[in-house]
Amino acid sequence: MKVCIVGASGKLGRYMLKHCLDRGYSVVGVCRPQSTEKLAHFGDGIELVPGRTSDRDVIRRAVAGCDGVLTVLVPWGVNGYSSGTAQAVLDYSEERARLVFSCGWHITRDGRDEYSSVFLAILKVGGWIARMLRFVDINDQVEACRRVFRSNKRWTVVRGSDIEEGESEGLPIWREHVGDPALKSNRTRRTDFGLFMVHALTNDALIRKAPAIVSCKSPSALADA
Ligand SMILES: NC(=O)c1ccc[n+]([C@@H]2O[C@H](COP(=O)([O-])OP(=O)(O)OC[C@H]3O[C@@H](n4cnc5c(N)ncnc54)[C@H](OP(=O)(O)O)[C@@H]3O)[C@@H](O)[C@H]2O)c1
């Protein structure tokens, strides 16, 4: 299987890269030119396409011939970085390709997610401050996912809980909606977020789904099991 990782040099990207290589996949990585050093230790194991992920020509070249595309959606700046990245992946990926996008629980597909008032308050205040500083525009990540949800391609949008570092605890569990008691612990190891993204490439049950994930070892997941 040939897989493109869009945002390969970030923390999540590097975990996904390792999981793909562990499976023997051939990998094309897209990352900013100034970040290629972060992938130097992978040597010839991956093909690199340096460039901004919202650059349509960069994405067109990177996803050509790929069976799967793993895209880290991050709402940097206020110039449509996330939505531009998603649109380019949707436009240029192969028809047959499995497309897997990352985001957080704040993204809702059908409005049936249930959030705590604390979560909503943090999102509102944090999002406003970040936008005022022209640092991050969460609304652009929302727009990016809206475009994915509208697409007829073979996509999955993986919605991550709060993230922590540490050894793998195994493949996270998932539910259709935030608010499900099984997700209550709201924590996933970053390596396992990557594991779920890579797992989604070969799990057709996740096509056109927006799974919200949590660690399989978290108290809420164990209680639910
Ligand atoms: N962090 C959390 O707590 C959390 C919680 C839930 C879900 N998520 C989701 O998890 C995914 C990964 O998030 P993460 O926080 O762990 O980040 P990450 O994996 O470190 O990824 C950040 C990405 O953004 C790029 N980047 C950094 N600064 C940039 C800039 N100024 N302009 C353009 N690109 C820039 C990085 O590339 P370089 O290598 O070039 O810097 C990297 O590819 C995201 O989809 C996020 O929504 C995160």
Image: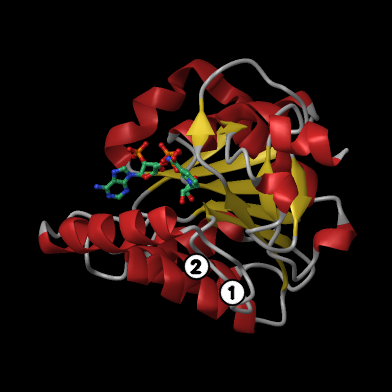
Picture residue at 29% right of the left edge, 55% below the top: 76
Q: Measured along the vertical axis of the image, is residue 186 above or below residue 76?
A: above
Left or right of residue 169: residue 140? left
Residue type highlighted by circle 1: Val
Q: Residue 27: where, in percent of width, then height?
A: 65, 39
Which label number is shown at residue 221?
none
Picture residue at 53% right of the left edge, 42% below the top: 29
Which label number is shown at residue 86?
2
Left or right of residue 149: residue 225? right
Q: Is residue 143 visible?
A: yes
Picture residue at 14% right of the left edge, 60% below the top: 134
Residue type highlighted by circle 2: Ala
Q: Residue 17: where, in percent of width, then height?
A: 61, 32
Left or right of residue 198: residue 105? left
Characterize the local packing of mark 1: few (<14), some (14-19) or many (20 or more) Cα atoms within 10 angstroms.
Answer: many
Q: Residue 35: where, in percent of width, then height?
A: 33, 33
Is the CB atom of the residue marked by disc 2 within 8 angstroms of ligand 1's nearest atom? no
Residue located beneath label 1 in the image: 148
Give the quarter of the figure containing the N terminus: top right
Q: CA distance from mark 1 to mark 2?
A: 7 Å
Q: Measured along the vertical axis of the image, is residue 119 above or below residue 168?
A: below
